Amino acid sequence: MDGAGLWRDTRRASIILTSSTLSPTRMSLISLLPRWTESRWSQPLDRALLDHLEPQAAVAGLLGPGPQWTFTTGHLNTLGDMVHAWVGWGRLPVRSTPDEARATTGQGDFIPELFRYLKAIDHLGLIDSDFIDHIYQHNWLAADLYSVMDVLELTAFMGQTDASKFRIVEIGGGWGRVPEMLLKLFPGKIEYVMVDAVPISLVSAEAYLRGAFPELNFGSFARGDDYQPGSYDVYFIPSWELNHLGSARFDVVMNIESFQEMTQDRVDYYLSWFDLVIADRGIAYIANSRDYVFVGDWNFPTSWRTLARHRTPRSWTPDNSTHILRKEVGHFSAGNRIIDVAYASTIPTDPAHVAVSTLRQIRESRAG
Ligand SMILES: C[S@@+](CC[C@H](N)C(=O)[O-])C[C@H]1O[C@@H](n2cnc3c(N)ncnc32)[C@H](O)[C@@H]1O
């Protein structure tokens, strides 16, 4: 089913459910979008679960957190304390003034640029004046627009299928912004597994998504729930327990702004694991900087064909791309390389470009 197909189904379901209360024009995807309040980030951290997972993470070796993500958490109290680490510039509220946007991102027009991009790729018919009203009224952050962007880009490439549900696995999903947006926009069609090596991310995502979707069925390895494909809407599992996912196959494997902070052996391990679990013609959605912490080799399986690779408004370093590939039968390295070379010609080099100056500052502060 293509993205538009998912959307049409969703709209039909919404009309059936709500036709007595909403007029067809207002009964759009907008009605499904999250409505956040000021208390979105004030949920307390589950200390007992953290105390259970943190000692395991400390001895998990290759499958535990790398140095970037090894820190004590005793001083952290709520989910809000982690937002900066999870999404960087994405913490900017959409209602920010240009001066506030410049102070956070270096770009006064950061939010309008995000809108322009979303509008240009909007194959679902989502981005209109109602959408803009909605996000202004309901406390959206730039990161929530990233989620809309990820949903638009992912569903654009999902292709025709008669699958009734899509099974997705994400490594390093932060608080769960992508599953939240997918579950909202495509109710009943998404089954999601969240893998993370960082206990505070796992614990936060579980608390956040359970709070956002009290009606859904959640499973958690750390709480003793066994995984069976089809048995949960959302399942949480530490990276060092991946073998407990058994022989599940996934329509989508995903990593966003996370492999970029790992080492070569971790990235190699996860890409190989993705190749084991991705379904035939499944989509790999990999959006990362390749010039930040991890500057090694991206050893994609040769049977993954690149469908798209490009910078987006989230690209906060020069070489930061959203790379979308599909597992097929064959060897696609040669064709993929041509797309990589074409992409490389779009990497900014002008010292005044905000991504170039951001990376320069990071390197200078590391050197200093
Ligand atoms: C910068 S955040 C990005 C979060 C999310 N993908 C997003 O875009 O909102 C990096 C994520 O990777 C996770 N992570 C860091 N090291 C990891 C590792 N070695 N294995 C799995 N996940 C890891 C962090 O806990 C966090 O969830």
Image (spheres, rainbow, N blue to C red):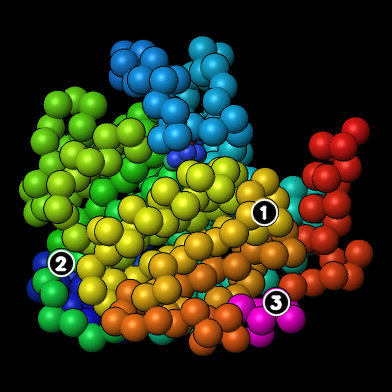
Q: Label 1 crowding class (10 Å Cα cut-off): few <14, some 14-19, many 20+?
A: some
Q: Is residue 299 magenta?
A: no
- Which residue corresponds to the image point at 41% horizontal and 35% vertical from the top-left? 63
Circle 2 sits on which residue?
A: 165
- Where residue 31 appears, x then y in whole percent? 31, 65
Q: Position of residue 319 (x, y in %)?
A: 69, 65
Residue 344 bears which disc, if any?
3
Q: Which residues fall within the magenta stretch?
A: 340-346
C-alpha span from label 2 to label 3: 36 Å
Residue 257 seen from this side: yes
In the image, taking residue 282 as reference, residue 144 lies left or right, namely right
Q: On the image, numbered disc 1 is attached to which residue? A: 295
Q: Looking at the picture, which amino acid does disc 1 mark?
A: Val
Residue 286: x percent and y percent? 48, 63
Of badges 2 and 3, nearer the viewer stands 3
| Between discs 2 and 3, the one toward the N terminus | 2
Q: The disc labelled 3 sits on which kind of residue?
A: Ala
Q: Earlier in the sequence, mark 2 or mark 1?
A: 2
